Amino acid sequence: MTGEITHGIRKIEAFSIFIEFMKNLYKDRHMITTMAIRELEVRYIGSLFGIFWAVINPLSQVAIYGIVFGVFLKIKPDPSFWN
């Protein structure tokens, strides 16, 4: 019984730590967004498409994988995967 109580207390402590972390993120949201935008601008400033490369690059990779696996290798997903 004491093991269950200790486990419950640890869950409450972990949850309170998570809530405190989320409060700090919300409080510092302006600084976080500013730093993220600055990081993206610095990373893609010299590229041809600029910051849009952050979206174009993953989309082009998905398209290439789709063509390679779907068209050339003719691999189809297992129907039970979607159920």
Image (cartoon, grey):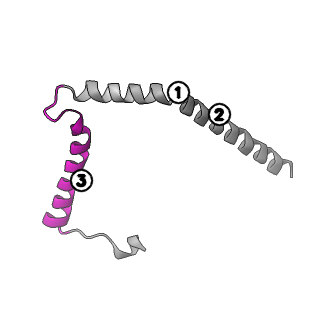
Residue type (three-letter) at the residue carrying disc 1:
Asp
Q: Position of residue 7 (x, y in %)?
A: 76, 46
Q: Kindly report the secondary structure that dominates the magenta region of the rendered protein.
A: helix
SS assignment at label 2 = helix
Q: CA distance from mark 1 to mark 2?
A: 12 Å
- Mark 2: give few (<14), some (14-19) or many (20+) Cα within 10 Å: few
For the magenta stretch, what is the residue range?
A: 46-74
Return the residue nearer the eye: 40 or 63: 40
Q: CA distance from mark 3 to mark 2?
A: 37 Å
Residue type (three-letter) at the residue carrying disc 3:
Val
- Mark 3: give few (<14), some (14-19) or many (20+) Cα within 10 Å: few
SS assignment at label 3 = helix
In the image, which is nearer the foreground, mark 1 or mark 2?
1
Looking at the image, which residue is at 49% across and 30% down?
A: 29
Rendered view: 76 above or below 18: below
In the image, which is nearer the foreground, mark 3 or mark 2?
2
Instruction: State the residue position of label 1.
Output: 28
Residues at circles 1 and 3 in contact by the CB criterion of under 8 Å: no
Q: CA distance from mark 1 to mark 3?
A: 34 Å
- Quadrant assignment for the C terminus: bottom left
Q: Quick one: which residue is furthest to the front in this view? A: 30
- Whether residue 18 sits left or right of residue 28 in the image: it is right
Looking at the image, which residue is at 65% across and 33% down?
A: 20
Q: Position of residue 78 (x, y in %)?
A: 33, 72
- Assess whether residue 48 is covered by the magenta stretch: yes
Q: Which of the marked residues, 3 or 2, is nearer the chain's N terminus?
A: 2
Instruction: State the residue position of label 2.
Output: 20
- Whether residue 83 sits left or right of residue 9 in the image: it is left
Name the quadrant containing residue 67: bottom left
Residue type (three-letter) at the residue carrying disc 2:
Glu
Q: Which of the marked residues, 1 or 2, is nearer the chain's N terminus?
A: 2
As drawn, the label of residue 62 is 3
